[in-house]
Amino acid sequence: MPNRIHVLDPDVSAQIAAGEVVERPASVVKELIENALDAEAMHILIEVEAGGRQLIRVTDDGHGMSPEDAVLAFQRHATSKIRTAEDLQRILTFGFRGEALPSIAAVSHVELITREPDRDEGTKVVVDGGVVTELSTVGCPVGTSVSVRRLFYNVPARLKFMRSPTTEMNHIVDIVSKFILANPHVSFTLRHHGRDIIHHSGDATRGDMRAALITVWGRDVAREMVPIELSVPRIRIYGFVSKPSLTKSARTHQVFFVNRRWVRHHALSSAVTHAYRGMIPAERQPVCVIYIDIEPLLVDVNVHPTKIEVRFANQAEIQRLLVQAIQQALSAVQLTPTITSQPQVMKPTVASPKPSRGAKEREREELEAFRRLLRQKVDGVATPQETLPAGVQPAERVAASVDEHRIETASRGAPGAGESPSQDVKAPKAVPPQH
């Protein structure tokens, strides 16, 4: 009986591994930007066509690569980030697995152009479906440019399930926005079909985190954000959280970075929700950008090939500190916990000697004045000078007076918002009869 277990062909295993790292065009953008940041780039240009289906090009001004490293970078598990197993316990770089470029090259056509500062010529490497097809020298600026074309051309199943160019582009915008928030000191430009979609200048803003917020979410959101800061030995938590007046229906505007690495972490989201308990409706979510700088020994980033999941050695302590940091920040700006389903709209007021009364109160006081007048008229306290029309009894005369008063009030017009209320109608003083 032949053996049932056999070693997979390298091309097959490469495509399987690529499926874990490269889920969609945004995954390619993420991996290439991380490589650029690890190369200490300060200016990163991302060019995209057809939502990443036709072209993804990431160009940086980092330290570049030598010709030997440029070729070796496409070998699986080849990396400059770690050397030994102990290095996994103190990872501070974005990449360390040595899987990004090989995985991308296994399912696309890749062209890499790079040059180091101390070299006069650059290196060009072309890889098609994981196979190096060209290696040459070229003239190019210092840094690295990686062009990815025909993504998933040799994986029909993955190509079939790609979304529309608009949807894929939205995912790319989202991932670039997260890198801007994590690295406000770096300049980013996202260009789609030659048109700039996002531009953030790290030089002009001098790395200001609030400027990054404005680039990503706009001035209105940034204006409603409150800074947070809390430090203890080996842990620092800082960033921005929204005032209770700014909430969203989902957690799409909650972003977390651990040692500048964007992560998804349910425990962190739960801590944020707990910090706002009693301040916002249960169905609403606050906005936040949280940075956690932590001793590498206290966090494990080697959880998933995409490196967006981490595990904390002291998760409960991280949650407690995060809640404390948020509540301290909100207390500092004197925000009182209140739950409202609709935003409170402040009515405009006009300065006056005393506050205006409501319409119901004015109506009640006027009615009481009319009743006093009615009692005086009916009791015969009217002045002798008053003459009644023929056929009109005293009580009917009072009703006529009331009607006259209403007509006169209507002709003057009802008092507008902010105007002083009308004066109470006084009953005429009784005058003793003259003999």
Image (spheres, rainbow, N blue to C red):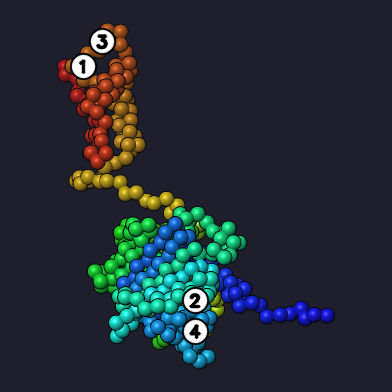
Which amino acid does the dot numbered 2 rest on? Val
Q: Nearer the viewer, mark 1 or mark 4?
A: 4
* Label annotation for residue 389: 3
Q: Which of marks 4 and 3 is in front?
A: 4
Of pointers 1 and 4, the one earlier in the residue sequence: 4
Q: Distance between the residues labelled 2 and 4?
A: 15 Å
Residue 296 is drawn in which quadrant? bottom left
- Mark 4 residue element: loop
Of pointers 4 and 3, the one earlier in the residue sequence: 4
- Which image quadrant: the N terminus? bottom right
Q: Mark 4 points at which residue?
A: 78
Q: How far apart are marks 3 and 2 (CA)?
A: 114 Å
Q: Are marks 2 and 4 in contact (CB under 8 Å)?
A: no
Of pointers 1 and 2, the one earlier in the residue sequence: 2
- Which image quadrant: the C terminus? top left
Q: Are marks 4 and 3 in contact (CB under 8 Å)?
A: no
Q: Mark 2 points at which residue?
A: 132
x and y percent of residue 52 in the render?
A: 45, 61
* Residue found at x 32% / y 40%: 358
Q: How far apart are marks 3 and 1 (CA)?
A: 10 Å
Q: Nearer the viewer, mark 3 or mark 2?
A: 2
162 up-or-down from 413: above or below: below
* Residue found at x 52% / y 56%: 163
Q: Name the residue under label 1.
A: 386
